[in-house]
Image (cartoon, rainbow, N blue to C red):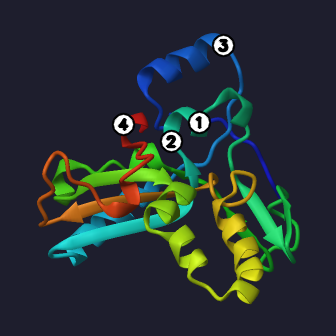
Amino acid sequence: MWQDQPTTRMLPMPNDWLDALKHSQSRYVSETHDQQIAFIDSLSHALKSGVILMIDYGFPAHEYYHPERNTGTLMCHIQHVAHDDTLYYVGTQDITAHVNFSALLPAPQTNLQAIGYTSQANFLINNGILNQLADIEPEQQRVHANRVQRLLSEAEMGELFKVMAWSKGLYFAEDETLQGFYRGDRFERL
């Protein structure tokens, strides 16, 4: 049975957003991501030198905690149907939530450096997906073009999915970046 209960626990929002929420007297329900920082920290400990690349659906905090998203991002999927009833067919459906990418900026103890954040579309285009499509045999291009369109379209996966990268033990000069973040890097918006 679902049951609402009060809590004194605060969402991990910037203070000015928390203040605005208090003054608006609006209700806000959201998921908490207690383990996401621990997960990134565990990756940091496992990596001696290299790049961690994460691709998932989500938003920066200013979109994640947008007033129109005041019921959170929790979604359920069963047989290709999306809904928000977590108690429907318990144990047989996927239950997911979007990532708050702003909350993934590494803490100093992880020894990770966040080096890029962009949409899946920008990342794939920067890495040459359109050039690869052009190299396919003409009779196969239409089939593959439809698949690529799904990956790149803002109405499909291109904007909903984001890509974030962290490095450890590597040095990037101020004007260097990974190819996937060459154009359209949104890191400054986190």
Q: Nearer the viewer, residue 38 or 166?
A: 166
Kind of residue at badge 2: Pro
Q: Earlier in the sequence, mark 4 or mark 1?
A: 1
Q: Earlier in the sequence, mark 2 or mark 3?
A: 3
The residue depicted at 64 percent of the width and 53 percent of the height is 160
Direction from residue 171 to residue 30 in the image, left or right: right
What number is the disc on residue 24?
A: 3
Tag 4's secondary structure?
A: helix
Tag 1 residue: 63
The residue depicted at 57 percent of the width and 58 percent of the height is 121
Label 4 or label 3, whichever lies nearer to me, is: 4
Q: Earlier in the sequence, mark 3 or mark 1?
A: 3
Label 4 or label 1, whichever lies nearer to me, is: 4
Regarding residue 8, the answer to whether it shows in the image is no
Tag 3's secondary structure?
A: helix
| Quadrant in which the C terminus appears | top left
The residue depicted at 87 percent of the width and 77 percent of the height is 79
Q: Nearer the viewer, residue 105 or 3?
A: 105
Kind of residue at badge 4: Glu
Tag 1's secondary structure?
A: helix
What number is the disc on residue 172?
A: none
Tag 2 residue: 60
